[in-house]
Image (cartoon, rainbow, N blue to C red):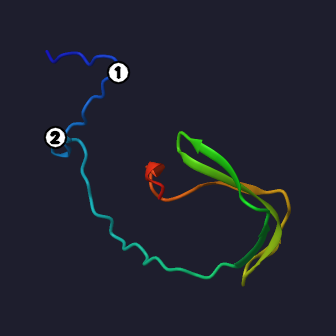
């Protein structure tokens, strides 16, 4: 009898070759080739970025949108004031080296 799995451990998945009740087949269709299409041009007025500080997921800043607009062949509209976002500064997961 195999040892019981202890709490806090993860059971390994069986190898795919041991799955005898599943029959994998190749679909009889071809997937479409991905393509890109222009959606819209965006202009956004923003307040200055405000630094939040270092957190568990990196150094963060926030910005508030003052307004703006977007315009494209099938989509156009206005960006209302008051929205915004929080952004992670830098690209390194370890920012202790100053990069």
Outermost residue toward the bottom?
Answer: 73
- Quadrant (top left/top right/bottom left/bottom right) for the N terminus: top left
84 over 11 or under it: above or below: below
Secondary-structure class at tag 1:
loop
Question: Which residue occupies 25% across, 45% down?
Answer: 22
Image location (x, y in percent) of residue 98:
48, 55
Left or right of residue 25, residue 76 in this image: right
- Taking the spot 20% from the left edge, 45% from the top edge, the residue there is 16
Which is closer to the viewer, label 1 or label 2?
1
Tell me residue 28's x, y (percent).
33, 69
Q: Judge the density around disc 1: few (<14), some (14-19), many (≥20) Cα neighbours within 10 Å.
A: few
Q: Which mark is on residue 78?
A: none
Residue at figure coordinates x 47%, y 59% from the top left: 99
Compared across the picture, whether 25 is left or right of 76 comes to left
Image coordinates of residue 67 in percent, x first then y, are 84, 67
The tag on residue 8 is 1
Residue to which mark 2 is pinned: 18
List x then y, in percent, for residue 97: 43, 52
Where on the picture, by quarter, is residue 25? bottom left
Residue 78, image quadrant: bottom right
The extreme front residue here reads 98
């Amino acid at each position: 009898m195999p040892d019981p799995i202890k709490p806090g451990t993860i059971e390994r998945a069986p190898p795919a070759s041991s799955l005898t009740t599943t029959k994998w087949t190749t679909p009889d269709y071809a997937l479409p080739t991905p393509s890109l299409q222009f959606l819209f041009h965006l202009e956004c007025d923003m307040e200055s970025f405000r630094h939040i500080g270092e957190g568990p997921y990196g150094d963060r800043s926030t910005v508030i949108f003052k307004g703006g607009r977007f315009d494209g062949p099938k989509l156009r509209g206005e960006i209302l004031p008051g929205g915004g976002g929080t952004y992670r500064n830098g690209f390194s997961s370890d920012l202790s080296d100053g990069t």
